[in-house]
Image (cartoon, helix red, strand yellow):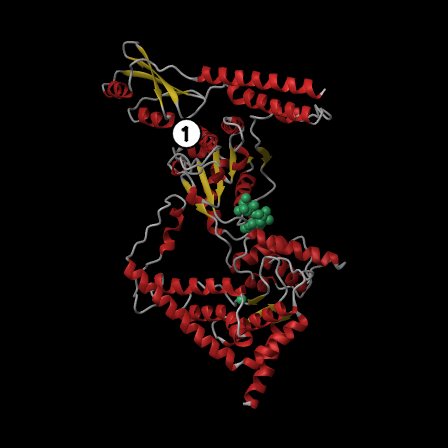
């Protein structure tokens, strides 16, 4: 049995290779005579051209032009970019007939991958002794080139379900209005953007916003993710795009939503290794489709990304995604609104203060907040309560904000002691320095994200401006952990590396961005401004001289050194508090604001009496 099945495999492989060779040979196109692009342009200039037909090849953007001249002469020309040539022709006031990317080569785009898959499967099946062959995965295979877009009719999510994001919603209002009644806009000749690009960090509500637009206008919503397009086989992505837009045209007015568009629309020509041909093809097909339908056909293409910097500039051109909306993480007010939306179907006890939760969650996105309330509800349910208490939210906060508390991980006593003093050092500075803190929690329970402990302040409000004084205090607080280790143990650990990084970063920003250093002056030397380009240009350019760079380094070091000295003085002054706090931490593993402040007041008093 083994031998004969091996023989079958070999025959199959040989047949497949033959098929491959024939198919590729048949796609090599003959070059069409001596007619050149230059001649074509010259003839357009002279007004000799009456008709142009553009036929894209399967490998878009290449294609062929069929030109009809005044004297009925027919000529043809191979072009490398059909989109570009279309724009060129249009600029001569000729309206070209644009054909779809050919389906007749379905053999190459659809059957071939299918066949290849078949071969692979046959191979695998015979290797596994053909036990479960024909298990019904065929159905999936038949749908290979079809779009995977999920169609949902709008209506489930409305704009009122999107909390905060006031400006973003205002920007999108006219699109809702247009989708409700496209004719109104067509009548006065208004041009509505074809594409809207939503840009923002993950979880800020981009998908939600797009859905809400469809829901508000009550139109169908086709959604597909950029990564769905990126397949192993060349041509499948492009055919999915074609399919998606064909469906959308049948259902206009509607919204086509492309999530994670960066997966397909990366800057072209930067891909490394395999797979990038496929992506380019998919992207080109998308551009051809977007250029192909009229402005007021009633299709709005929305796309979402969190990496707008790596997108191909071609997709941002007029007539494509010409509207860009940045979806920002919510501010305090926005966070409270979002919490209210998600608390609607969750019974809250009276002690729950969502305003305060909003205050302590600076930096949380909508998705984080939703997750926070969900975790709170789970915690309440675990304790067999039918309502959520503030304490549940506190527990959930630590879980989602800092990672799961892992009480089970075994840590040595020594490690624990070091961590306790380290965190106590942070905590004392948070408490003593006027512009930072107050301390909300101090913990030496490992977070599961690599941190041995944490000290969390309770910011009273979101600050738009940072002051020089506050930044210096931030640096001091960051250094507090390391200083405490040094005072107590005569030796230091590697645990403070992220603290040191943070302190250095703040100090550098003070010097290069905010002009807080007298020696450097009020000049921006910040190289991070160019961060978005780093992906593209490997060579990192610096805008200032070596001499200035040296001076900056000296200034940054001076700031950090100075902060270190001041912070050390403070901690030495409160050394008794440091011991007491570390002791309590070792005992209870975690202490809250009240406990810490009580401890501080008592011990500090003793310090003063004792001296
Ligand atoms: P993105 O697409 O930007 O990654 P999503 O739209 O998928 O984010 O958001 C994920 C979830 O977070 C949403 O389903 C919703 O529950 C919640 N969410 C995010 N932003 C908001 C908001 N502004 N209002 C209400 N809920 C939000
Ligand atoms: Mg999303
Ligand atoms: Zn630390």
Q: Residue at x 43, y 42 (%)?
A: 310
Most distant residue in the front direction: 3
Q: Nearer the viewer, residue 400 or 249?
A: 400
- In which quadrant of this rendering is ligand 2 seen? top right
**Going 35% across and 57% down the picture, which residue do you hit?**
526
Closer to the camera in the image, 264 or 589: 589
Percent across and percent down for residue 83 are 38, 27
Residue wearing tag 1: 291
Q: Secondary structure at mark 1?
A: helix
Q: Quadrant of the C terminus?
A: bottom right
* Residue 518, x across and y down, in percent: 31, 69
Instruction: Return the residue found at the far left.
Output: 46
Residue at the farthest top position: 72
Q: Is residue 253 left or right of residue 268?
A: right
Q: Is residue 437 visible?
A: no
Q: Residues within 10 Å of mark 1 (few under 14, many from 20)?
A: some
Give the quadrant of residue 126: top right
């Amino acid at each position: 049995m083994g031998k004969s099945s091996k023989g079958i495999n070999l025959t199959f492989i040989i047949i497949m290779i033959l098929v491959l060779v024939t198919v590729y040979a048949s796609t090599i196109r003959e070059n069409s005579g001596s007619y050149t692009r230059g001649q074509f342009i010259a003839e357009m200039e002279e007004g000799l051209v009456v008709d142009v037909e553009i036929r894209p090849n399967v490998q878009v953007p290449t294609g062929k032009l069929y030109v009809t001249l005044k004297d009925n002469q027919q000529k043809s020309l191979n072009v490398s970019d059909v989109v570009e040539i279309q724009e060129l022709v249009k600029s001569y006031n000729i309206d070209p007939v644009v054909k779809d990317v050919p389906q007749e080569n379905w053999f190459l785009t659809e059957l071939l991958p299918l066949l290849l898959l078949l071969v692979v499967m046959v191979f695998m099946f015979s290797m596994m002794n053909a036990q479960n062959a024909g298990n019904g995965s065929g159905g999936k295979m038949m749908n290979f080139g079809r779009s995977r877009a999920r169609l949902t009719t709008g209506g489930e999510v409305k704009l009122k379900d999107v909390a905060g994001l006031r400006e973003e919603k205002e920007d999108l209002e006219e699109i809702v209005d247009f989708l409700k009644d496209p004719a109104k806009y067509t009548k006065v000749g208004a041009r509505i953007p074809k594409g809207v690009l939503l840009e923002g960090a993950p979880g800020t509500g981009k998908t939600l916003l797009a859905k809400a637009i469809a829901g508000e206008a009550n139109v169908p919503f086709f959604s597909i993710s950029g990564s769905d397009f990126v397949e192993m086989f060349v041509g499948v992505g492009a055919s999915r795009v074609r399919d998606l837009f064909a469906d959308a045209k049948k259902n206009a007015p509607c919204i086509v939503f492309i999530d994670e568009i960066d997966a397909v629309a990366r800057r072209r020509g930067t891909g490394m290794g395999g797979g990038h041909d496929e992506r380019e093809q998919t992207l080109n097909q998308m551009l051809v489709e977007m250029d192909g339908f009229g402005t007021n056909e009633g299709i709005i293409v929305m796309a979402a990304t969190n990496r707008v910097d790596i997108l191909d500039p071609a997709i941002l051109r007029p007539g494509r995604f010409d509207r860009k909306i940045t979806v920002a993480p919510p501010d305090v007010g926005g966070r409270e609104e979002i919490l209210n939306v998600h608390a609607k179907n969750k019974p809250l006890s009276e002690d729950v203060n969502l305003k305060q939760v909003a205050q302590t969650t600076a930096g949380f996105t909508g998705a984080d907040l939703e997750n926070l309330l969900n975790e709170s509800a789970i915690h309440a349910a675990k304790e067999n309560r039918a309502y959520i208490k503030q304490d549940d939210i506190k527990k959930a906060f630590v879980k989602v904000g800092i990672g799961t508390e892992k009480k089970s991980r075994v840590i040595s006593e020594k490690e624990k002691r070091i961590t306790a003093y380290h965190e106590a050092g942070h905590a004392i500075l948070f408490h003593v320095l006027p512009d930072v803190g107050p301390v909300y929690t101090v913990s030496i329970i490992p977070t599961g994200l690599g941190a041995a402990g944490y000290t969390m302040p309770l910011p009273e409000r979101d600050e738009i401006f940072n002051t020089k004084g506050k930044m210096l205090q931030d640096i001091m607080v960051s250094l507090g952990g390391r200083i405490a280790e040094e005072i107590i143990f005569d030796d230091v650990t590697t645990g403070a590396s992220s603290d040191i990084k943070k302190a250095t970063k703040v100090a550098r920003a003070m010097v290069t961005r905010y002009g807080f250093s007298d020696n450097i002056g009020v000049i921006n030397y910040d190289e991070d401004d160019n961060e978005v380009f780093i992906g593209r240009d490997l060579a990192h350019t610096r805008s200032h001289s070596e001499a200035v760079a040296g001076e900056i380094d000296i200034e940054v070091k001076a700031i950090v050194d100075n902060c270190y000295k001041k912070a050390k003085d403070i901690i030495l002054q409160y050394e008794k508090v440091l011991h007491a706090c570390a002791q309590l931490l070792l005992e209870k593993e975690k202490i809250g604001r009240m406990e810490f402040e009580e401890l501080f007041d008592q011990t500090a008093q003793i310090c003063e009496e004792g001296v």
